[in-house]
Amino acid sequence: MHLPRLQLFEFNDAPFAPKALQRTIVSALSRTLRWGRMLDGLVPPFLAFLEASGAREVLDIASGAGEPAALLLEALAQGGHTPPTCTLTDLHPHLEAWRALVERHPTTLAFVPEPVDATQLPPDLGRGRARVIINAFHHFPPTLAQRVLVGMARDAPGVFLAEGLVRDPRSFLAMTPWGLPALVAEPLLAPEGRLASAALAWLSPVAVLASAWDGTVSTLRCYSRDELFHFAEAVGPGWRWEYGTYPVGRFGRGSWFFGVPVTSNDRASTPPAPSPARSGAAPRR
């Protein structure tokens, strides 16, 4: 399904949306990802990225509540792989949520309590760390998205982007078998604001409708393969970029995109890639 990208609003990041509604949506989404084990399919491409980049430390950018990064580390460990250490960052830090995650993962998770601008990463913070965004790149409009990618790539051993959706509203349907129970359970399991969550999820359809809107809009905000490669051109030469999709739940699809610097020896030994119009292979850049 070919659809144009639309930068519509989402309740979970709209300045006019009540904080209680945003908290309910984000918390239920985190629980949906966990209950549905929806990041398990991301493990193989992420392992390929870690091998290609040679990095064992990861800087997670635009971490939000931090659950996607934590779930990916858990999926790696459950698959018998040693997860990298991961540092959570955001322009608007979620300190309470991050502290709770670090308590659960004291050896693999840490966080930066100060705001971190992805377009201007502090050199000391980024040094030696691969840069990762999971389920958040679609929030950036195109001009900012390209600036974020360029900022992430600056002096980086590698850059990894992943989305749990593709630009097709049907991809959001894969989350509904777990998303609806997560919303219903939110007033019982939420760490705070349970009365407000009950009013939104039990006594009215507000939480369900807002979540359905956000999920649909998220698919329409996702960047396509060609758009991501276009953004990567601004990083400059000397990088190799790859794109693919991965299974989400039983019938959904997500996407991944990563780049690593290419040495002169790598360029000499790497044959030209086929045209992307004829093959799913990523073009060499």
Image: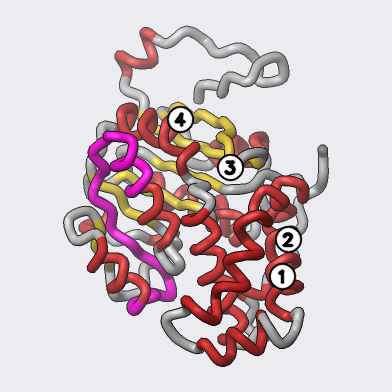
- Front-most of residues 229 and 111: 111
The structure residue drawn at horizontal position 71% and vertical position 46%, both measured from the top left corner, is 171
Q: Which residue is mark 1?
A: 9
**Residue 282 higher or lower than 267, as above or below:** below
Residues packed near mark 2 inside 10 Å, few (<14), some (14 to 19) or many (20 plus): many
The type of residue carrying mark 2 is: Val
Figure quadrant of residue 230: top right
Q: Secondary structure at mark 3?
A: strand
Q: Which residue is mark 3?
A: 248
What is the CA distance from the residue labelled 2 to the residue labelled 1? Answer: 7 Å
What is the CA distance from the residue labelled 3 to the residue labelled 2? Answer: 18 Å
Query: Foreground mark, 4 or 3?
Result: 3
What is the CA distance from the residue labelled 4 to the residue labelled 3? Answer: 33 Å
- Lower sequence index among marks 3 and 2: 2
Q: Position of residue 125 (x, y in %)?
A: 24, 58
- Lower sequence index among marks 2 and 1: 1
In the orientation shown, which residue stands out farthest toward the left? 107
The type of residue carrying mark 4 is: Pro
Quadrant where the N terminus sits is top right
The type of residue carrying mark 1 is: Phe
**Mark 3 touching mark 1, by CB under 8 A?**
no
**Residue 106 higher or lower than 151, as above or below:** below
> In screen coordinates, is 229 left or right of 149?
right
**Mark 4 touching mark 3, by CB under 8 A?**
no
The structure residue drawn at horizontal position 51% and vertical position 29%, both measured from the top left corner, is 242
Query: Is residue 90 found inside the magenta-colored segment of the image?
Result: yes
Q: Which residues are magenta?
A: 73-96
Query: Foreground mark, 2 or 4?
Result: 2
Q: Which residue is mark 2?
A: 217
Q: Which residue is mark 4?
A: 237
Residues packed near mark 4 inside 10 Å, few (<14), some (14 to 19) or many (20 plus): few
